[in-house]
Image (cartoon, rainbow, N blue to C red):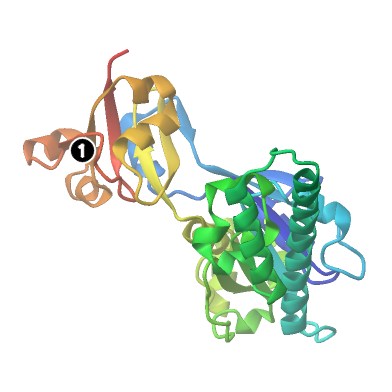
Amino acid sequence: MKTAIIGFSGSGKTELFRALAGPGVSGSRAMVKVPEPRLEPLSELFRPKKITHIEIEYLDPPGGGARALGSRVLSDIRGVDCLLAVLDAFTGAQDPVAQKDSIEAELVISDMAVIEKKLDRIREDRKKDRHLYDPLEEELLIQALQLLEHENPLRTERTLARHEALKGFAFLSAKPILYAWNVNENRIMDFNLPAEEPDQAHIAFSARLEREMSELEDQQEVEEFMRDLGVTGSVLDRVVSKTFELLGLITYLTTAEKQVRAWPLKRGRNAWEAAGAIHSDIQKGFIRAEVLSWEDFLRCKSFKKAKELGLLRLEGREYIVQDGDIITFRFNV
């Protein structure tokens, strides 16, 4: 998974990147482990040689000068899964709502340029009687352009934005976006965030608070500092939680002596698809999935007891995986 952090100069964008990436990170890219407290009790039980977290790659592309997104930034972020846009609601130097509107406008204009260029090529092909284009693709592009011309990002029409025929264009306004409002540290918990919209969410954070906490070496001091301010959960916890929501992801877990691991999966996917996320051979030779829900594991504390109580279930390939499921795949190839 990739997330690009965007925003105007001075918005707190780089401070947020450093807070997510952790101390000592240099450069503008960082692989960050997704916090997963459910791995700890499993690792205590299995004593594996390796514990593997889900990872998110965060990008901090250079600012676009007077704009939030320069041409180079637009190119850099086209391949990411999610956008994290930082708004300055702290310094008073800029209007954060105007910043948000400007970012949305830049995404929309970028997508319009891509569509218009493609439609021009299609018209040229038609003039030369070359049938090198897909009529369905053309129809969908025209629909997308009409939506953008009314200043609506493509994410507002999910069916259109996610259509397989448009996937290769990697439209920026179709990507889920999380707005991070950089506020005074005393307002994180009561800042009045806008209502969430399709594939758009909001959180409040304080760049100054993150900077001050980064200077504390003792984790207990950090927790006390946050507690004094009434802040619950690190900014990483909150960003990851919202990102998973936007991308429609859940987490399932696998256990063995060699490795205890967390895996991301689209919500609503079945056991056969979850097996394929691990390895194509497991999917190809799928026999069944042994499933223990996280809640049942907490009650039993062991797989042996869960089996005795009939809580360790055998599921087929069509079983819809739930968040926190601990799965052992049985397969034969």
Q: Nearer the viewer, residue 56 or 99?
A: 99
For the point 82% across and 69% down, which residue is it?
8
For the point 58% across and 82% down, which residue is it?
193
Q: Nearer the viewer, residue 317 or 34?
A: 317
Left-right relation of 228 to 172: left
Secondary structure of the residue carrying numbered label 1: loop
Mark 1 surroundings within 10 Å by alpha-carbon count, few (fewer than 14), some (14 through 19), many (20 or more): some
Left-right relation of 216 to 312: right
On the question of residue 215 being in view, the answer is no
On the question of residue 263 being in view, the answer is yes
Place of residue 308 in the rendered image (x, y in percent of width and height, measured from the top left): 7, 36
- Residue type (three-letter) at the residue carrying disc 1: Ser
Place of residue 40 in the rendered image (x, y in percent of width and height, measured from the top left): 40, 43
The residue pinned by badge 1 equals 302
Q: Is residue 196 above or below residue 144?
A: below
For the point 23% across and 38% down, which residue is it?
291
Q: Is residue 67 above or below residue 115?
A: below
Q: Quadrant of the C terminus?
A: top left
Q: Residue furthest right?
A: 65
Place of residue 1 in the rendered image (x, y in percent of width and height, measured from the top left): 59, 45
Place of residue 155 in the rendered image (x, y in percent of width and height, measured from the top left): 58, 65
For the point 74% across and 48% down, which residue is it?
122
